[in-house]
Image (tube, rainbow, N blue to C red):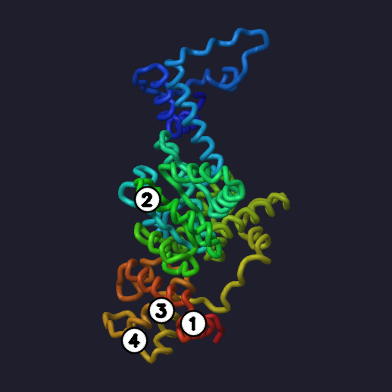
Amino acid sequence: MPNDFARDWIEKRLAGQVAEALGEVLGDTVLVRVVVDVRAAELPQQSAAAEPPAGAARPAEPATAAARPRRAAEARASQAAKAAGDLNPRYVFERFVTGPHNEYATAVAHSVAESPATAYNPVFMYAATGLGKTHLIQAIAHAALELHPKLQIKYVTVERFTDDFINAVTDKNRIDGFKQSYRENDVLLIDDVQFLVEKQQTQVEFFHTFNALYEAGKQIVITSDRPPRELVELEERLRTRFGQGVVVDISRPDLETRIAILRKQVKWEGFQIAEPEVLEWIASRVTTNIRELYGALTRAVSYASIQGSAVTLDVAKEALKDILPKAYLRPVTIETVQAEVARQFGLHVNDLRGNRRTQDVAYARHIAMYLSRDLTEASLPQIGARFGGRHHSTVIHGVDKIERQLKDGHDAQLQDLVALITARLKTVR
């Protein structure tokens, strides 16, 4: 290869497949080594599939026995190419930023890609819109295709699954082909399973597909915007199967992780940012959605390009002034959250920071942790430190508990209380 970048790319992504294909054709083990040689840049560029010149003799077709390994390799390559065609080339592990909010989910994803259907199966990932679950499930597909070229790997959205099923039912002759295309996979990845709601026939077929794969020891990965227990519109038998394996969630990234996400995006896209403060400023304003985080960065860069200026903090503020949420009228800190929650519950701030575990104190402490996470830029370890030096896993437990109660909508008093405290914290005094 002509340079280090090309060598590293080939070695990382294709060396194993090249070695395997050559080994099958030559009938022997082949070690592939990619070296840098500047003379490679001077070689004529020609497609490997180029047709011979007009009038040139075509190579004879190899003997049947000799052709079989090559054809098998070509078939697998074709299958891999088809599977990869449904994937976004950007959604790979290399471009995924890991932080406290998705550390466990990322570890599970890597394990699944490296060793399908061993430690974790089925896997159910859930997250709110724009937090990276589609990126992560497609990264599993990319890595699995790279590491296991012989496996049948299929990634689809629920909408695609539904369309395929409807087309197969409409044409009775295609139902067997539909079942084969889904049930003969070694790894099946289904995105946005929540859209099975109100599709009763599709739910039945999905149930049978799930069972067939699971009983055959095949890997299943599913994503949703809610945990299985909250998909109440789906059949009970589906929800129980979704929850029988590993259920992992992806929460909102903290400020440090959002800055890291922007930095990686700048690197991958080759953006030129004149002032590093731009990324910190955007990350501090866009707090709930990674997709919006990317959008804000892209808008700032494109605005600067149109204006013919560098991407400075002033330019970014001008570019995003109409789309970013307004800053709070007063700064919210963990201490102000604790003070307001303690006041609402008739407690002392030290009760929230101390070791008292009575029901009323624990409840107030969980609410204070939730609001500290929601209204401040503090990381989980920072919040834990302000609550008496508690571990960040304790903070996660408290935050998750309040989030679940708010989402299910059954505790109207809690919703009103959180809204009241939030409004008071944001009001100028």
| Mark 4 lies on residue | 360
| Mark 3 lies on residue | 368
Left or right for 381, reference 191 = left
Location of residue 367 by image quarter: bottom left
- Vertical placement of 82 versus 308: above or below? above
What is the three-letter code of the residue carrying label 4?
Asp
Q: Residue at x 64, y 56 (%)?
A: 300
For marks 2 and 4 on the same chain, the one whose residue lies earlier in the sequence:
2
For marks 2 and 1 on the same chain, the one whose residue lies earlier in the sequence:
2
Left or right for 163, reference 5 = right
- Cα separation, mark 2 vs mark 1, equals 40 Å
What is the three-letter code of the residue carrying label 3?
Ala
Of labels 3 and 1, the one closer to you: 1
**Position of the C terminus by quadrant:** bottom right
| Mark 1 lies on residue | 415
Q: Is label 2 in contact with label 1 (beta carbons under 8 Å)?
A: no
Q: Which residue is drawn at 47% across and 31% down?
A: 76
- Vertical placement of 321 versus 337: above or below? above
Q: Which residue is drawn at 37% across and 74% down?
A: 398
- Cα separation, mark 3 vs mark 1, equals 14 Å
- Cα separation, mark 1 vs mark 4, equals 17 Å
- Cα separation, mark 3 vs mark 2, equals 42 Å
Of labels 4 and 3, the one closer to you: 4
**Which residue is outermost to the bottom?**
346
| Mark 2 lies on residue | 214
For marks 4 and 3 on the same chain, the one whose residue lies earlier in the sequence:
4
Comparing 255 with 135, the one in front is 135
Location of residue 294 by image quarter: bottom right
- Cα separation, mark 4 vs mark 3, equals 12 Å
